Amino acid sequence: MKKGTVRKILSALQSTSGKDFLNRLTLQLDQAIDADYTFISRINIENHSSTTLSLVSHGKIADNFTYSLEHTPCADVSDDSLCVYPENICAHYPKDQLLVDMKVEGYIGTPLHDSQGNVMGIVVALYETKIEDPELVTSLFELFTGRISAEIERMEHQDALTKLNSELEQKVSERTLKLQETLDQLKASQNQLIENEKLAALGRLVAGVAHEVNTPLGVSLLANSTIESCYHEIKDAFSSGALSKHVLETNLETINEAQETIGLNLSRATELITNFKQLASDFHIDELETINLSEWIDALLSSLQLLINTSDIELIKHYPETNIELITYPFRLAQVITNIISNSVNHAFDQDATHHKFIAIDVHTNDEECIISLQDNGQGMDQDVTSHIYDPFFTTKRGVGGMGLGMSIVKNLVSDSLKGSIDIDSKPGEGTRVNIHLPKKAAA
């Protein structure tokens, strides 16, 4: 073997993967062994055929093709044999018409094994003249077979994962479309309520449906986060070459379970919203409870972590060292904080923003009240926007965001149910701060 041959091949393969890796490696091997044809192919045991994944013909990349293994030396290689015929290959395989037509004189083929030890493909060199140094060819082929096999497996697993992800996205999309149709009907009903000047009734209905839909949508978001986590775990394992069958099977099983969970919960949410027009009751019963405010907020924020993480936003928390006990309506308070954080995520930051984004939550207390402050470093709002922020159906992202009910509901919940107050401080380019003032004991 010429000095530096392996180093030259490895240098050419740096920072390559997939199809590009196979083509570059085939070209480098072809040049090193001075063959007329060099190719890497994938074996199909079921139909006894072989399909080239990378083919070099007289020094150039050529189109891939599929051929039958019957009566060919490749069939022997696929049976896990190293085949070396420096000359007269056609005399040994006279029924291999392809070799005859190509006027091939010498043949060397090496099997490729998958991670289970089974033959998955072959590496072949064809010569139109006698092979002068068959040991060089076999040595180079055997040196790179492991890396070739690993890359083929990685490509196939990646393709399978991409297909699975596409199927999952399609199923979620179909269910989301059905939900959107129901939401469109809901919006039409809401417009009718506005025309009839029944905004008070609308507030109660929206609050009720938001309560009921919160759980299935929250579970769906968590399940979707699980799918994303499994996807990245498998992808990272592919990239590092450390993917095992156990890791793949475990993640695929988790993805399947998460998809079923999403389907069930989106169906439940659709059913709830369909029945929305029939709702005429007040808020769902939410009993007064004594909570440790710091621990309670931690638990709430953990359920919102997906929303925050997917938007590349850091969550900063500042709590006093002493425990703060608050007698309040936990669900209504959760709805308030969730709506405010969702507003920050959806409206505060421009999609093209590259600066460090954060949402900070601070808790303060005095003898009479607790103050929960939520601060973001987003684009802020001008006075015209802040003056309408609590108006029902007011939104700065009509058609792409919510329906403009979030802050209206927040205002009503804080003032009416929680017996507190809320104020907003915001300026363009300086972010937004929302302060929620709550009595330490809410009125029953």
Image (spheres, grey):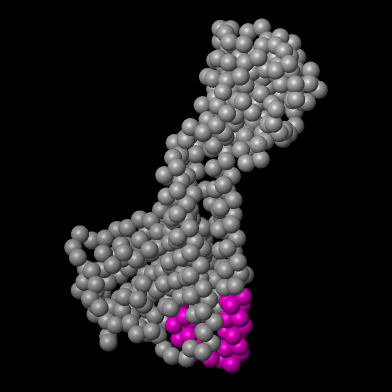
Which sits in the foreground, 393 or 153? 153
Taking the view exactly as shown, the residue that stands out farthest to the right is 101
Instruction: Name the spot of residue 110 as percent of width and height, x first.
Output: 59, 22
Which sits in the foreground, 7 or 32? 32
* Residue 110 sits above or below residue 345 on the image: above
| Residue at x-position 51% and y-position 70% | 266
Q: Quadrant of the C terminus?
A: bottom left
Q: In the picture, residue 254 is in which quadrant?
A: bottom left
Majority secondary structure in the magenta region = helix
Question: Is residue 322 magenta-colored?
Answer: no
Instruction: Name the spot of residue 183 as percent of width and height, x first.
Output: 58, 76
Which sits in the foreground, 278 or 51? 51
- Left or right, 57 with respect to 84, comes to right
| Residue at x-position 72% and y-position 13% | 88
Can residue 442 be seen here? The reply is no
- Left or right, 315 with respect to 172, comes to left
* Residue 337 sits above or below residue 50 on the image: below
| Residue at x-position 54% and y-position 51% | 353
Q: Quadrant of the N terminus?
A: top right
* Residue 160 sits above or below residue 286 on the image: above
Q: In the picture, residue 401 is in which quadrant?
A: bottom right
Instruction: Name the spot of residue 301 as percent of width and height, x first.
Output: 36, 62
| Residue at x-position 56% and y-position 53% | 165
Which sits in the foreground, 106 or 273? 106
Question: Is residue 196 magenta-colored?
Answer: yes
Can residue 270 be seen here? The reply is yes
- Residues rendered magenta in the picture: 181-210
Q: In the picture, residue 91 is in which quadrant?
A: top right
Instruction: Name the spot of residue 318 as percent of width and height, x first.
Output: 29, 58
* Residue 369 sits above or below residue 373 on the image: below
